[in-house]
Image (cartoon, rainbow, N blue to C red):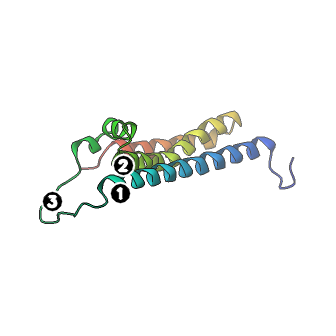
Amino acid sequence: MTGSGELPAERWMQTIISYLLRGGVALSAVLVFAGGIIYLARHGLEMPEYRTFRGEPAEFCCLSGIAADALSLRGRGLIGFGLLVLIATPVARVAFSVFSFLRLRDFKYVLITLIVLALLLYSLFFRMR
């Protein structure tokens, strides 16, 4: 046991989760920053046109469009992909927690975490009408 009364496996789980969260946020920040730099370099001097409304381009309505734009190093694609990474970071944390609780054989928390993961995924992939 460690000085704080935690088991080594629990400490390992907390360490991995902290790296996962920090890495996800850092990666997201780098992607959004790089996308912003690229976008401003290409479009920074354009005058905005506020008289007509232009919604999001169709390619930004699906994950494949955002990924294609990010892979072609377009500014808006990198910004969108960075935001997707930021959204996926806590979801990945919850998914990792399921496997960690399974490893610890803490089935009550496995069930609770699976419910939280199901709610997160439902809210991401299904729209309420």
Residue at image point 46% right, 41% down? 118
Q: Are marks 3 and 2 in contact (CB under 8 Å)?
A: no
Secondary structure of the residue carrying tag 1 is helix
Residue 23 lies, in percent from the top left, at 59, 47
Amino acid type assigned to the residue bearing label 1 in the image = Leu
Q: Residues within 10 Å of mark 1 (few under 14, many from 20)?
A: some
Residue occupied by mark 2: 75
Horizontal relation, residue 94 to residue 38: left or right: right
Q: Residue 20 is drawn in which quadrant?
A: top right
Looking at the image, which is closer to me, 6 or 40? 40
Q: Are marks 3 and 1 in contact (CB under 8 Å)?
A: no
Cα separation between marks 2 and 1? 8 Å
Residue 116 lies, in percent from the top left, at 50, 46
Amino acid type assigned to the residue bearing label 3 in the image = Phe
Horizontal relation, residue 91 to residue 58: left or right: right
Residue occupied by mark 1: 40
Secondary structure of the residue carrying tag 3 is loop
Residue occupied by mark 3: 53
Looking at the image, which is closer to me, 27 or 93? 27
Mark linked to residue 93? none
Q: Residues within 10 Å of mark 2 (few under 14, many from 20)?
A: many
Cα separation between marks 3 and 1? 21 Å
Q: Are marks 2 and 1 in contact (CB under 8 Å)?
A: yes
Amino acid type assigned to the residue bearing label 2 in the image = Gly
Secondary structure of the residue carrying tag 2 is helix
Cα separation between marks 3 and 2? 21 Å
Residue at image point 30% right, 38% down? 65
Q: In the image, which is nearer the foreground, mark 3 or mark 1?
A: 1
